[in-house]
Amino acid sequence: SKRVAVLTSGGDAPGMNACIRAIVIACKKRNYDLIGYLHGYNGLIKQESISLSLDSTHNLIQQGGTVLHSARCKAFTEEAGLKQAAANLSEAGVDALLVIGGDGSFRGATHLADHYLGQIIGIPGTIDNDIAGTDATIGYYTAIDTAMNSIDKVRDTADAFERIFLVEVMGRHAGFLALNAALSSAADYVILPEFFESPESEIKKILTQIHAQRRVRGSVSFIVVVAENVWPQGLQALTKALNDSGITDVRPVTLGHVQRGGTPVSNDRLLATSLGEYAVSLVGTDTSNVMVGEVNREPTTVPLTTTSDSKPLNSAQVALMKSIMNERYG
Ligand code: F6P
């Protein structure tokens, strides 16, 4: 029999619990022992673990957050921390470690592989979808829905006052969440890291768009979705720049960590369930230091080291958003 360990690391994402549930069930089916390390890699270093049984899976699929808790772990970027973790895994007799997380977590896992001889399998969990080797990451679909619903609400008040709103969405340095939130909420403009040229050119385009729209439709609301980390000096600076260029009454809204919470939507539950089962199915094979993912709905594995490669936005979606921004009133 095998001994499997699982942990969740980095920014939590809706569906992490659904994945833990799938792993518990997949291990039970194969008579594997399963332990869960708490607080990401910190628990691995400090030997904080819990055993996970079928009892722990009741109602788990619908819970946001992660019952294993999460963390970003500084000690795991250092040799001493990695060695300690590897020693703890060997001592606990762990044959395979499953890491549910994002980019930073997979970098940590890659370094751990220099010290730990067991299997390491990554499972992509982040609202940012910025992981190469999988079409979507666990949590991404829910975060789009949350952002979309929030922007719908902003639209109500924006319409009432015929105001301009800037809505900042998460995504780290990628525009997946921003683009999909913008498209699904019929935002009027989006600022994405992948296409950001300069503050001046973005402001010029926004103003052209607002003026064109007002010419055609009179005074109406206007919503700009802004990907986080893209505007130099942040959302307040963009608000001020627009106010300074004669557009008054601009309101900034930062959606923030709301986007990380909530019950996962079905697509995230389905992805989490498939990937959890698939990861456990690889235990005992000679596949290691890989991330499991789904491409065109088929399970795949890619080396952990390639998961930080750049991942392009969907080009059809980009073209669609561009046409909405440029041609609707142009
Ligand atoms: O990676 C998930 C994420 O929510 C990003 O979208 C965001 O940039 C970051 O984490 C925020 O990190 P923290 O929760 O540490 O503030």
Image (spheres, helix red, strand yellow):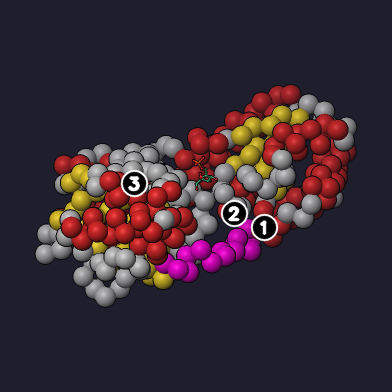
In the image, 254 versus 308, the foreground residue is 308
Residue 310 painted magenta: yes
Residue position marked by numbered label 2 in the rendering: 174
Examine the rendered structure and indicate whether residue 54 appears above or below residue 253: below
Q: Which of disc 2 and disc 3 is earlier in sequence?
A: 3
Q: Is mark 3 within 8 Å of ligand 1?
A: no
Real-space Cα distance between discs 1 and 3? 33 Å
Residue 314 painted magenta: yes
Q: Is mark 1 within 8 Å of ligand 1?
A: no
**Residue at the spot x=41%, y=71% of the render?**
303
Camera-near label (1 vs 3) is: 3
**Residue at the spot x=86%, y=33% of the render?**
244
Residue position marked by numbered label 1 in the rendering: 194
**Residue at the spot x=72%, y=33% of the render?**
236
Numbered label attached to residue 42: 3
Residue 278: tell me if it is visible.
no
Where does the magenta region start and end? 304-317
Real-space Cα distance between discs 1 and 2? 7 Å
In the image, 306 versus 155, the foreground residue is 306
Q: Residue furthest front?
A: 80
